[in-house]
Every structure is written in C-alpha cells, then in structure tokens.
C-alpha cells in the first residue's frame, strides 16, 4: 500500500494540489492499477471533486492571473 499525503497551499479558502509527483501517483494508481477512488480519498483525505479534477487533467493547473495589474500612477 502506498502512503500519499495531501500537500498544497491555501487559495481563497480552497486547497490547491500542486505537487506534480502526488498528482501523477494518484493518476497512475487509479487509471492504470485500478485502485478505487474511495481508497485514494481515504488515504489522502481529499474531497471527491478534487480527485475528479486530478483524474480529468493530465497535469496540475498553473497560476493564472484574473486581471492584468494596474499601471502605476507615478510611472509614465
């Protein structure tokens, strides 16, 4: 049995999983080895929606800025 721990950081009240090694490990275990989604959720403590996102995307989503930064008032 593998011990996979949840790692991430907080962003607007949501935990975002950015650990690429964990991401690939979970995908491999579920998609190739046939480990159940429930087993992964038990081991990691992650929510089923998070697991669903991990299985849908081949790699973690990167940071994307919502708006471009405002121009400084003192710079021309």
Image (tube, rainbow, N blue to C red):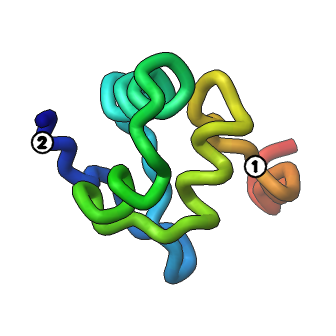
Mark 2 lies on residue: 3
Point out the image quarter for the C terminus.
top right
Q: In terms of secondary structure, where does tag 2 sit?
A: loop
Q: Is residue 26 left or right of residue 13?
A: left
**Observer-nearest residue: 4 or 21?**
4
Residue drawn at x 83%, y 56% as measured from the top left? 66
**Observer-nearest residue: 71 or 7?**
7
Q: Is residue 28 left or right of residue 53?
A: left
Q: Is residue 23 left or right of residue 12?
A: left
* C-alpha distance separating marks 2 and 1: 33 Å
Where 72 sits versus 28, above or below? below
Residue drawn at x 29%, y 64% as measured from the top left? 42
Which numbered disc, 2 or 1, marks the residue closer to the eye?
2
Q: Which mark is residue 23?
A: none
Mark 1 lies on residue: 65
Q: In terms of secondary structure, where does tag 1 sit?
A: loop
Dot 2 or dot 1, earlier in sequence: 2
Where 60 sits versus 11, above or below? above
**Observer-nearest residue: 55 or 20?**
55
Residue drawn at x 75%, y 49% as measured from the top left? 65
Furthest residue toward bottom = 13
Point out the image quarter for the N terminus.
top left
Mark 2, Cα crowd under 10 Å, few <14 / some 14-19 / many 20+, is few
Where 19 sits versus 43, above or below? above
- The picture places residue 12, in percent across and down from the top left corner, at 56, 77
Query: Pointer 2 and pointer 1: residues touching (CB < 8 Å)?
Result: no
Q: Identify the image quadrant of residue 23.
A: top left
Residue drawn at x 50%, y 82% as measured from the top left? 13
Mark 1, Cα crowd under 10 Å, few <14 / some 14-19 / many 20+, is few
- The picture places residue 56, in percent across and down from the top left corner, at 73, 37
- The picture places residue 53, in percent across and down from the top left corner, at 66, 49
């Amino acid at each position: 049995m593998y011990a996979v721990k949840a790692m991430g950081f907080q962003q607007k009240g949501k935990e975002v999983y950015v650990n690429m090694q964990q991401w690939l490990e979970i995908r491999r275990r579920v998609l190739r080895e046939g480990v159940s989604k429930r087993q992964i959720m038990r081991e990691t403590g992650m929510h089923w929606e998070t697991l669903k996102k991990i299985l849908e995307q081949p790699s973690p989503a990167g940071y994307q800025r919502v708006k471009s930064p405002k121009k400084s008032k003192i710079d021309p």
